[in-house]
């Protein structure tokens, strides 16, 4: 503020004399450095003065900005008349949401349209395209063509726009963790929060830099965000990983509600109020927006589809998160089509939670490393320890889903396994054995869990059996299966096992049996399904593939004869066989060939439910 007065001229000099000038400079220096908090390994950058209208322009990504062949011009927004908060704002009890000012409708990416990059790029343009993909695992070249303030389609149910909210909604600190994120993607995330959030609800945006080394995330980021007046930067002094970076953000947050977003998101109209309203209803509510998929190649933000229904989170016994359709019982329980719905688990990247409740639950397990399983741990804790986890259909946030991670970590450390073992040991009781069956007897060094066990005891949390029966009754329980483990073929001297990645449409093959579970761990359900948790062996006349289990038998119904050891497909009456080249499986007319003979581990015929 003082510096702005100096630059506007005259104000300071009227105070008279060099002594006053020196005093003001010393005061300015002292106040500035007083606001910088040093905490052992971390430096905190406070919010600064608001940006002036002429300064609020899009900034290109510096590492790729020095090329001779410039990218197509960005759609620069110059229509903020009074700084970043000069946005139409409705009353808090109305559901229309903050409407961002319109941009050039014909600019790249506007209204969520995708940007198609020409396939015939050459020279430096082609180099920048390739580097963008390499560094980010998404098309940074396309992202850089799109305004940081682009317009988005309204994905909400029409009923959301008339929803009434409390007038005393709590404020939130939005925490965004990043590591070497592309400038345009990170800043579009930040501006989407600012542009579409009521200013009286948004206390601050905290950017947690997880030890980035790209130049544009240093001084350029500090200079740019200083002008926004609401952004704080927290920098880690070493690579911490997502879990500890989020904890660092929570440490410096000052609002009563924490809202976590990934660094490659876009918040749509009306995204914030529905989340805060549910927490105002009960501070033990933990809420997630509907996550819309932004294309990693074109950055298209898809428009609302006819017949759209909300999905909820689940998990499999490899302790991997998965999406599922909303169960019919929860559909029937909704008062409106846009009412919040219970979700057994959360994806983990985008959610709001009361800071006090998060702390009561013990935050994240400090024994977790980098990332993985923290979403399931928080999900289990919330439900088992007196809270409620919800998906809020009136809140939509877009997210760029990458097909690979662009980041490197230390080799030889299976952090996901370590985190998952800790999760199972602390929270899953006797059900933990279903996970251990899949990873083998060597659990590895998972550290000391005594503090987390004591936390669970002190919170008087319910059992995992209660969670399964009351919160996730649709979960397939391996203990109900007629067989589990390897499915071995008897046709060759060497042992070959059914093998497949646990992904939809994956072709089922064979591979030498290794006894380590994983892709060779199968379940034969009491209703005749050959399962990889929520995926089933499916045959419709072509390849044998994995497909989402539907429970309707048909293409997923198999009968096992323990005498002939044949697996007969229910609708085709063909038998599953290993092919002659031992490269995969095929379906054949049933006959006395050893290639059709399969052995199930622990087969119990008494569990089979006959037609």
Image (tube, rainbow, N blue to C red):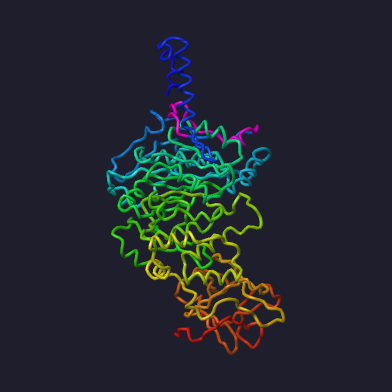
Residue 84 lies within the magenta run = no
**542 relative position to 347: left or right:** right
In the image as oriented, which residue stretches furthest toward the top? 17
State the extent of the magenta-drawn residues as a range.
46-68
Identify which residue, 173 or 74, lies in the foreground.
173
Identify which residue, 540 or 469, lies in the foreground.
469
Q: From what the image shows, is residue 124 above or below residue 561?
A: above
In the rendered image, residue 411, in percent from the top left (x then y), is placed at 66, 55
Q: Quadrant of the N terminus?
A: top left
In the rendered image, residue 451, in percent from the top left (x then y), is placed at 48, 59
Q: From what the image shows, is residue 84 above or below residue 318?
A: above
Q: Quadrant of the C terminus?
A: bottom left
In the rendered image, residue 322, in percent from the top left (x then y), is placed at 48, 62
Q: From what the image shows, is residue 12 above or below residue 424?
A: above
Q: Magenta region, mostly helix, strand or loop? A: loop
In the image as oriented, which residue stretches furthest toward the bottom? 563
Q: Residue at x 47, y 28 (%)?
A: 32
Identify which residue, 460 or 376, lies in the foreground.
460
Q: Residue at x 43, y 45 (%)?
A: 267
In the rendered image, residue 485, in percent from the top left (x then y), is placed at 58, 76
Q: How many marks?
A: 0
């Amino acid at each position: 503020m003082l510096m702005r007065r100096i630059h506007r001229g005259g104000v300071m000099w009227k105070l008279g004399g060099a002594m006053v000038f020196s005093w003001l400079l010393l005061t300015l220096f002292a106040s500035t450095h007083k606001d910088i908090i040093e905490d052992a390994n971390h430096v905190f950058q406070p919010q600064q003065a608001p940006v002036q209208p002429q300064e609020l322009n899009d900034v290109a990504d510096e590492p790729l900005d020095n090329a001779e062949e410039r990218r197509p011009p960005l759609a620069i927004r110059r229509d903020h008349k009074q700084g970043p908060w000069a946005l139409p704002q409705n009353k808090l009890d109305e559901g229309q949401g903050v409407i961002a000012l319109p941009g050039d409708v014909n600019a790249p990416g506007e209204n969520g349209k995708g940007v198609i990059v020409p396939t015939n790029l050459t020279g430096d343009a082609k180099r920048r395209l390739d580097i963008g993909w390499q560094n980010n695992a998404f098309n940074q070249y396309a992202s850089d063509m799109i305004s940081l303030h682009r317009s988005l389609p309204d994905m909400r149910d029409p009923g959301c726009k008339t929803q009434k909210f409390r007038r005393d909604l709590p404020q939130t600190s939005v925490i965004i963790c990043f590591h070497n994120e592309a400038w345009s993607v990170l800043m579009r995330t930040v501006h989407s929060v600012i542009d579409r959030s009521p200013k009286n609800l948004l206390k601050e945006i905290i950017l947690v830099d997880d030890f980035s080394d790209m130049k544009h995330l240093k001084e350029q980021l500090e200079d740019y965000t200083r002008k926004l007046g609401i952004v704080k930067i927290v920098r880690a002094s070493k690579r911490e990983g997502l879990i500890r970076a989020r904890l660092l953000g929570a440490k410096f947050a000052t609002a009563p509600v924490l809202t976590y977003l990934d660094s490659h998101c876009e918040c749509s109209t009306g995204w914030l109020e529905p989340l805060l309203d549910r927490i105002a209803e009960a501070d033990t509510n933990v809420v997630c927006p509907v996550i819309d998929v932004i294309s990693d190649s074109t950055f298209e933000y898809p428009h609302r589809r006819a017949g759209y229904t909300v999905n909820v989170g689940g998990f499999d016994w490899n302790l991997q998160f998965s999406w599922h359709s909303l169960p019919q019982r929860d559909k029937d329980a909704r008062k409106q089509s846009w009412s919040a719905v219970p979700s057994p688990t959360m994806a983990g990247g985008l959610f709001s939670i009361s800071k006090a409740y998060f702390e009561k639950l013990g935050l994240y397990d400090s024994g977790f490393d980098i990332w993985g399983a923290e979403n399931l741990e928080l999900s289990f804790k919330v439900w088992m320890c007196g809270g409620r986890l919800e998906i809020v259909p009136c809140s939509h946030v877009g997210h760029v889903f990458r097909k690979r991670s662009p980041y490197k970590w230390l080799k030889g450390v299976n952090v996901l396994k370590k985190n998952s073992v800790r999760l199972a040991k602390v929270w899953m009781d006797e059900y933990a054995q279903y996970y251990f069956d899949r990873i083998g007897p060597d659990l590895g060094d998972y550290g000391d869990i005594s503090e987390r066990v004591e936390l669970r005891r002190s919170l008087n949390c319910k059992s995992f059996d209660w969670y399964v029966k009351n919160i996730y009754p649709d979960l397939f329980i391996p203990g109900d299966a007629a067989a589990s483990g390897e499915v071995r073929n008897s046709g060759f001297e060497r042992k070959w096992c059914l093998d497949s990645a646990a992904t939809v449409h994956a072709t089922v093959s064979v591979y030498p049996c290794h006894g380590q579970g994983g892709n060779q761990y199968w379940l034969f359900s009491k209703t005749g399904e050959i399962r990889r948790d929520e995926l089933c062996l499916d045959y419709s006349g072509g390849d044998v593939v994995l497909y989402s289990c539907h429970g309707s038998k048909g293409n997923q119904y198999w009968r096992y004869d323990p005498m002939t050891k044949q697996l007969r497909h229910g609708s085709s009456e063909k038998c599953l066989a290993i092919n002659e080249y031992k490269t995969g499986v095929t379906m054949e007319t049933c006959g006395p060939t050893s290639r059709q003979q399969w052995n199930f581990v622990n087969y119990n015929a008494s569990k089979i439910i006959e037609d």
